[in-house]
Amino acid sequence: MTDDLLRMTGVTRVFDVSPPWLNRVLERKGRVILKAVDGVDLTIRRGETLGLVGESGCGKSTVARLIVGLYAPTRGTIAYEGVTIAGEGASRDEAALRRTRRGMQMIFQDPYASLNPRWRVADIVAEPLRLHSPDLSRADMAARVAALLEQVGLAAADGTKYPHQFSGGQRQRISIARALSTNPSFLVCDEPTSALDVSVQAQVLNLMRELQRRLGLTYLFISHNLAVVHHIADRVGVMYLGRIVELAPTRELFGTPRHPYTRMLLDAVPDLAMTGASRTAVAGEVPNPLDPPSGCTFHPRCPFANERCREENPVLRPAGGAEVACHAVEEGRLPPRVVALAAR
Amino acid sequence: MIADLAPLLAVERLRVEFPTRRGTLVAVHDLSFDIAPGEVLGVVGESGAGKSITGAAIIGLIDPPGRIAAGEIRLHGRRIDNLPYAELRRVRGREIGAIFQDPLTSLNPLYTVGRQLIETIRTHLDLNETEARQRAIALLEEVGIPAAGRRIDHYPHQFSGGMRQRVVIALALAAKPKLIVADEPTTALDVSIQAQIIELLKRLCREHGTAVMLVTHDMGVIAETADRVAVMYAGRIVEIGPVADVIHRPQHPYTVGLMGSIPSIVDDRERLTQIDGSMPRLTALPTGCAFHPRCPQVFARCREERPELFPAGASRAACWLLETPVAATTGAMA
């Protein structure tokens, strides 16, 4: 219990994506509500890396933004180190919330858009410090910034340069240095390597692992790339249309995927070991989140769907070493996975 | 098996330049490769390696002031790099089809997909409106668009990303080309859709005997699709060979590092192989081998002289380590 750093309980976030009022009146249409995150229960333990995977529009980035407070949950609560920071029962004291949130920082996907091009790198890295420790002296601040830059593999002298003088990978190191400036214990990383080339991605992933070991960090690592999540995460959650459909330790999830969607995703990943292999591609696409299917939202694409799946929405239940939201798994009518790995 | 045939596409010592205010940038240097009829050649590399420019040069789509400064591109033995514009238009589309990364920008949002297909078909094939429409519907069915007869009158925004990319593939195939240049065709798509598109591309090319130049940064896609792979670095091919050899027995230190840096869902490694630094900018290419500042096995000669492609195993690689047969065995370092 004490090991839980972050706990999300029944968190739902909806967005009103209705057309303007006049259009609604003229076209006689009602409001349009998009459920980006739908009743997510998630616990992140101290010191672990929780990976969150899913296809575009599944709500994984919304989860990240809910945690760091960029969005407020529509329903449900988020607690960090035992303190409710968002949702029902959250403190209304902004200053107190800010103090609690100091322990968490976020790293964004695009290292080009997330750094202010007009600021010098030292100012970028020092910005969270100025906010959270306003009484730090100039000299202390400079020393801290230099230490941070060296920690992420840049030179202290790089602080006087501007972001455009750095490559994509170096910029992502600057983002990491900025995130580490307040000595956080928890980093929310939303697709931190997706904009990078593979060899640079490897540098950043290695750096993140090193920092985690050295500083005892906890990561929420969001990515659409299953191989990257397999490499970095201790536990993995799979999201589909705003819900977590499977949550398991990494080895368990990749070794014995249980939810039909997880199996489908794993089968779809092109892998180096698959030279010349031919797979049966999965049919169908992610449905429109504005009009999700009834019952289990995966049922139109699921080969094992039956009447119950079309009507009743499954909830996460323990199954073996994992938690799975699937009626077929629960009823034991899911056949074991046929591994079609034709390794050469 | 197909290597004995006369090449469909032959690129020889291709050089692409972009004049800028601060001097001329050479995006592609001395590039030579062949594609056999029906073959899938993967071209991989990181951003800025020159792979997309190579594809654009073949389709004749290099935007001025960029230009092909030297070398030849031959299709069926006939030079296509110096054709007048009107003739180039006939080759492009008729003999070479193109698929680009973003299906939304390669379709005109103001016309129905049927209009665009019919226009392409009638430009290149001698068919009347009704016949062209029938062919368009047949093409849409072939690329797996349900209810093609109805969907043909829809606009691009009414299709999902995966379906749009299917339309783009139908467009590329419309005039039955012998070669398709596909530049990152699956990069903008989700994994499950990506698998469908790769499967579709493979099936269609097999059925039609179409050769493909597949440009991508995704080695996984190459592993499943290509017959041969060319690895590009800083505007040159550093290694080219059969796909299984390049992936499992890489010869060039860059290829070795590249393969090791790719995380996989089947192995458990604590650390990924790391190539320090990043690709040099075209404005400041190092002397000698362009990879030498990042190479773990660099020696004096690498800094001064640029290596040619040497035979190495079943592949060819541009590295001084592979110059002598003795050194070739040390190519597979960890």
Image (tube, coloured by chain):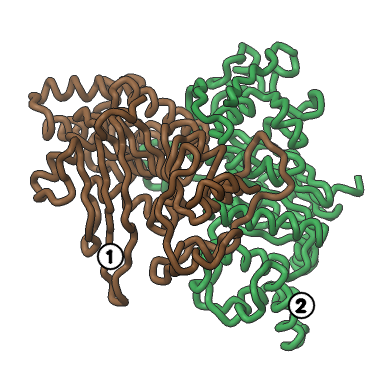
Chain colours: A green, B brown
Residue depicted at x 16% and y 45%: B80
Distance from the alpha carbon under mark 2 to that under mark 1: 49 Å
Which residue position is annotated with label 1? Answer: B18
Measured as percent of width and height from the top left, residue B160 is found at: 40, 34
Residue A81 vs residue B76, the one in the foreground? B76
How packed mark 1 is, by other alpha carbons closer than 10 Å (few <14, some 14-19, many 20 or more), is some
Which subunit holds the residue at mark 1? B
Specify whether residue B142 is in view. yes
Residue at the right extreme?
A2
As displayed, is residue B309 above or below residue A330? below
Q: Which mark is residue A133?
A: 2
As displayed, is residue A90 above or below residue A8? below
- Residue B133 picture quarter: top left
Q: In the image, what residue type sits under mark 1?
A: Phe
How packed mark 2 is, by other alpha carbons closer than 10 Å (few <14, some 14-19, many 20 or more), is few
Asked if badges 2 and 1 are on one and the same chain, I answer no
Residue A72 vs residue A298, the one in the foreground? A298
Measured as percent of width and height from the top left, residue B261 is found at: 60, 49
Residue A21 vs residue B283, the one in the foreground? B283
Measured as percent of width and height from the top left, residue B76 is found at: 19, 35
Q: Which mark is residue A66?
A: none
How many marks the image carries: the answer is 2
Residue depicted at x 54% and y 21%: A301
Residue depicted at x 58% and y 21%: A299
Question: In the rendered view, does B124 fall on the left or right side of A32?
Answer: left
